[in-house]
Amino acid sequence: MTVPKLRAFVLDTTDARRLAEFYRELLDLEYREGDEPPPAGSDDPRGRDWLQLRARDGGFQLSFQQTTGVRPTSWPGDEIPQQAHLDTSVSSVDELNEQHTRILSLGATLRFDRSDDPEEPLRAYADPDGHIFCVFVG
């Protein structure tokens, strides 16, 4: 039996280029051919519609769909649920702490900190549009 293959995870955003650049830097991804940013000062029609990033090893794709409104999750509060989130990992608590500073400098907001948990240290962040992503050790 054949089954569908997961092609990409898509995030809605009010600024596709900004969010794509955030995740490109965060995860060291590369643009799909033709989706690269235009020269400074040039029009960016793709950046107002749909952009796609790819893992350098071809392992996954992350896409960004322009929309007129995104309601950021209120997680860990209950008012607006996560609905979906991305999980990433690093190899040690030291690396988790190093990435924390970098992630904040890229524009993320810390939403949950369990970095001192001896069994499963992690931090959860909201990206610039309020989507949640986690960084685990392991």
Image (tube, rainbow, N blue to C red):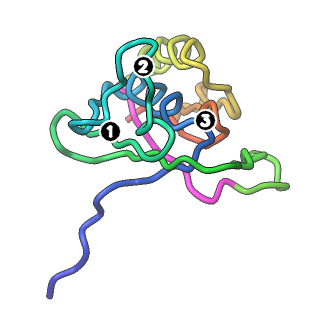
- Residue 75 image offset from top left, x and y in percent: 74, 46
Q: Residue at x 25, y 39 (%)?
A: 32
Q: Secondary structure at mark 1?
A: strand
Which numbered mark, 1 or 3, is in the foreground of this view?
A: 1
- Gap between marks 3 and 2 measured at Cα: 35 Å
Image quadrant in which the N terminus is located: bottom left
Residue 42 numbered mark, or none: 2
- What residue did someone put label 1 on? 53
Q: Which mark is residue 8?
A: none
Q: Nearer the viewer, mark 2 or mark 1?
A: 2
Is residue 119 visible in the rendered image? The answer is no
Q: Earlier in the sequence, mark 3 or mark 2?
A: 2
Residue pointed to by mark 3: 124
Q: Percent x, y for residue 128?
A: 63, 30
Nearer-the-camera pick, 35 or 19: 35
Label 2 or label 1, whichever comes before in sequence order: 2
SS type, badge 3: strand
Residue drawn where x is 67% and y is 49% of the image: 68
Residue at (67% x, 26% y) in the render: 109
Crowding at mark 1 (Cα within 10 Å: few <14, some 14-19, many 20+): many
- The amino acid pointed to by label 1 is Leu
The one nearer the camera, 39 or 11, is: 39
Is the C terminus in the top left, top right, bottom left or bottom right quadrant? Answer: top left
